[in-house]
Amino acid sequence: MDKFLAIENTIFTITMVLYFAAMIFYFVFFTVKKEKAGKIASAIMIVAFVLHTAALIARGIGAGRLPLTNQYEFATSFAWGISLCFLIFMWKFHFQALGVFVSPVIFLIIGYAAMQSKEVKELMPALRSNWLAFHVSTAIISYGAFGVAFAVSLMFLLQLRQKDSNFWKNHIPQPEKLDLISYRAVSLGFLFLTFVMITGAIWAERAWGSYWSWDPKETWSLVTWIIYAVYLHLRISKGWKGKSAAIFAVIGFICVIFTYIGVNTLIPSIHSYA
């Protein structure tokens, strides 16, 4: 088992370097307007994602369980989820410039993971549940989709300030399409966040005898859910689009980050393990 953990550590380090390299190439692509740099960055992101997946598999084998039970494991899985969602949206919408804004988010989160303890400890009784896989995996996809919506919304807000530019015309969709991409990403994230809430409640009842205990993480997860629910309600019922919707999506992701990092760091919680 130690052999797999050593392999995971090496692959994780390489993956982190590759995400950093992709971020630099995307920065060159965006600032110097070198299209080749963008293609190199996207290729590096794909390689980094494959190695990231291999690292998670090696971690799982080495730990003898799903790698989703502590700060380090969830942080690296969080980064993996954003990378997965980014690659899906990049492929679907032919939108490699999205990496300019997504890659720094991925690098910062995987950097946060690198600062956490990688020690494999025996699971506390509450974590020895089959609901763990459903609850945490849906959180990873949800947060990943919200991360993409955050990046797209930032691009939307920046594009509003741009004057005529051939680079923006050639590589970044029109504001209407950016708005649509953000909406779809939020919808995907909201669907999986709803699964997170439901599976978490069932798991909590099995582990602690109560579906809801107003633990800080539960409370902030509910706040996040409400923010995105309001976004979707206004979008569907009132036709809400544009700048206000983009700002709302940015605020929502800030709330996601606080729910994960802020609550774990600043507020005592029964969820402080992840």
Image (spheres, rainbow, N blue to C red):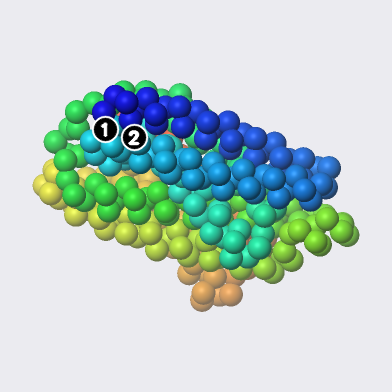
Toward the viewer: 189 or 244? 189
Q: Is residue 238 visible?
A: yes
- The residue lying at 38 percent from left, 45 percent from top is 220
Q: Is residue 244 left or right of residue 141?
A: right
Q: Is there a contact, CB below 8 Å, between mark 1 and mark 2?
A: yes
Residue designated by label 2: 59
Label 2 SS: helix
SS at circle 1: helix
The image shows residue 256 at horizontal and vertical percentages of 46, 46
Q: Is residue 57 left or right of residue 27?
A: left
Q: Is residue 46 left or right of residue 215?
A: right
Tag count: 2
- Residue 74 is situated, as x and y percent measured from the top left of the image, at 37, 38
Left or right, residue 32 beside residue 263: right
- The residue under label 1 is 63
Q: Residue at x 28, y 42 (%)?
A: 66
Q: Position of residue 131 (x, y in %)?
A: 21, 51
Which quadrant would the N terminus be assigned to in this image?
top left
For the residues labelled 1 and 2, the Cα–Cα distance comes to 6 Å
Residue type (three-letter) at the residue carrying disc 2: Arg
Q: Tag 1: residue type?
A: Ala
Q: Is residue 14 above or below residue 199?
A: above
Front-most of 176 and 118? 118
At 69% from the left and 69% from the top, the residue drawn is 176
> Label for residue 4?
none
Which one is in front, 224 or 108? Answer: 108
Assess disc 1: are there few (<14), some (14-19) or many (≥20) residues with their C-alpha within 10 Å of its C-alpha. Answer: some
Quarter of the image where the C terminus is located: top left
Label 2 crowd (10 A; few <14 / some 14-19 / many >=20)? many
Which residue appears at 45% of the width and 58% of the height?
A: 189
x%, y% of residue 183? Answer: 56, 65
Q: Is residue 108 visible?
A: no
